[in-house]
Image (tube, rainbow, N blue to C red):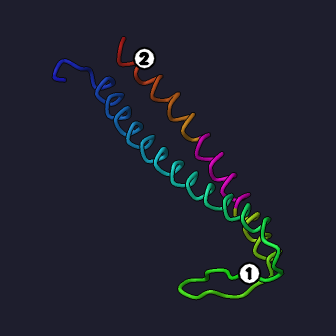
Amino acid sequence: MADMSPQQKHALTQLSINQQQLQVLIAQRQQLEVQLKEIEAAIDELKKEKEEYVYKAIGPALVRKKRESVLKDLEEAKEKLDLRIRTVKSSEKKLTEKIKELSEKLKR
């Protein structure tokens, strides 16, 4: 590292920072995908349910609500998660490209 130019040292630092940020984004995406699977499973179960009212967990309490209302809430939550996942994937892609550029810069 002593024989590196200041530009190379800066590129190496940026590469390290970007790799760490990418790891954080990957972890976030995985967590969001788990939440999405849970919501999809809940939606599937509610669609099978014939009762008009179901119980929804709100904090430590179970509250009786109309099944359609709970389904609507879950569908909205699913849409928001889908959007967040797409946003995180887009950020992952940009960071990955940046990492490739910095790696190429360091090879020269």
Return the mark for residue 86: none
Horizontal side of residue 98 vs 45, given as left or right:
left
Horizontal side of residue 70 vs 63, given as left or right:
right
What residue type is disc 2 on?
Glu
What residue type is disc 1 on?
Val
Check the picture and name the quadrant holding the N terminus: top left
Look at mark 1 in the image and give the residue it sits on: 54
**Residue 54 horizontal/vertical position (percent):** 73, 81
**Residue 43 horizontal/vertical position (percent):** 73, 63
Magenta segment's dominant SS is helix
Compare marks 1 and 2 and give the one earlier in the sequence: 1
Look at mark 2 in the image and give the residue it sits on: 104
Residue beneath the point at 69% across and 52% down: 83
Between 91 and 12, which is closer to the camera in this rendering?
A: 91
Q: Is residue 83 magenta?
A: yes
Secondary structure under tag 2 reads helix
- Where residue 81 sits, quadrant-wise, is bottom right
Between 39 and 106, which is closer to the camera in this rendering?
A: 39
Check the picture and name the quadrant holding the C terminus: top left
- Residues drawn in magenta: 78-90
**Residue 14 horizontal/vertical position (percent):** 37, 34
Q: Is residue 81 magenta?
A: yes
Count of numbered tags: 2
Observer-side mark, 1 or 2, equals 1
Residue 81 against residue 22 in the figure, above or below: below
Residue beneath the point at 45% across and 28% down: 99
Residue 8 against residue 14 in the figure, above or below: above
Residue beneath the point at 48% across and 44% down: 26
**Residue 106 horizontal/vertical position (percent):** 35, 18
Horizontal side of residue 43 vs 24, given as left or right:
right
- Where residue 63 sits, quadrant-wise, is bottom right
Secondary structure under tag 1 reads strand
